[in-house]
């Protein structure tokens, strides 16, 4: 399945990358591979493999939800990722609205050629107002900066999980 990924607020001299997304799904992990064309400030070829998953597909009330997001540098040269870790939103599957969002970090991370990094988010099943929630959820990633170029990441509902109302 192919998707387009846009680069927001890009200079007019930068070309827009095209994206091929390859998804592999297991019970608890989804892998999304982004392949991009050559913007003028980023080397050609595949830049990053981004994979995300939860430690379980179903959680009971009050169990912490652990979400791992891994970035692997496939570009063949060092890549500088900014605003790390990236914004991650817990989205309600029925309404497609966020119930909780982890803000972007203010760290800059340079991934060596073939380097990897994993970020673990832990969600306590509370919404923005501190109320417990239950139901079907998925995650969205966004606002990654790559060598100073905003690069939104959209997993398009590929990592889903359920939260039960009772233990």
Image (spheres, rainbow, N blue to C red):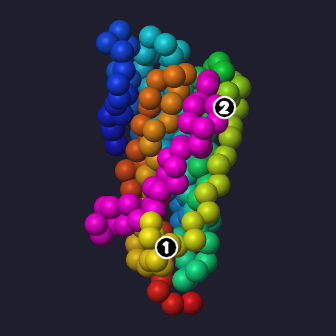
Q: Nearer the viewer, residue 39 or 28?
A: 39
Q: Looking at this view, name the residue that lies furthest to the bottom.
A: 166
Q: Name the residue under label 1.
A: 130
Q: Looking at this view, name the residue that lies furthest to the front.
A: 129
Main secondary structure found in the magenta portion: strand
**Vertical comparison of 24 with 61: above or below:** above
Residue 161, image x, y percentages = 48, 69
Q: Nearer the viewer, residue 46 or 143?
A: 143
Q: For the residues marked 1 and 2, what is the alpha-carbon distance in whole angstroms?
A: 31 Å
Give the number of the disc on residue 15.
none
Residue 157 visible (yes or no): yes
Lower sequence index among marks 1 and 2: 2
Residue 22 visible (yes or no): no
Residue 25, image x, y percentages = 49, 56
For the C terminus, the quadrant is bottom right
Q: Are marks 1 and 2 in contact (CB under 8 Å)?
A: no
Rendering quarter of residue 62? bottom right
At 44% from the left edge and 31% from the top edge, which residue is drawn? 151
Q: Nearer the viewer, residue 10 or 69?
A: 10
Q: What stretch is highlighted in magenta?
A: 79-108
């Amino acid at each position: 399945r192919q998707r387009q990924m846009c680069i927001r607020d890009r200079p007019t001299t930068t070309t827009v990358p095209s994206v091929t997304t390859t998804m592999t799904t297991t019970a608890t992990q989804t892998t999304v591979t982004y392949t991009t064309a050559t913007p003028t400030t980023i080397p050609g070829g595949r830049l990053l493999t981004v994979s995300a998953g939860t430690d379980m597909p179903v959680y009971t009330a009050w169990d912490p939800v652990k979400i791992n997001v891994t970035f692997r540098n496939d570009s063949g040269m060092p890549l500088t990722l900014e605003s790390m870790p990236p914004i991650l939103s817990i989205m309600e599957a029925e309404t497609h609205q966020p119930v909780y969002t982890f803000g972007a970090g203010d760290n800059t991370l340079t991934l060596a050629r073939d380097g990897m990094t994993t970020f673990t988010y832990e969600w306590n099943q509370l919404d923005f107002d501190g109320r417990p929630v239950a139901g079907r959820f998925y995650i969205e990633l966004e606002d990654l900066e790559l060598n100073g170029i905003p690069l939104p990441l959209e997993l398009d509902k590929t990592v889903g999980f359920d939260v039960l109302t009772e233990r």
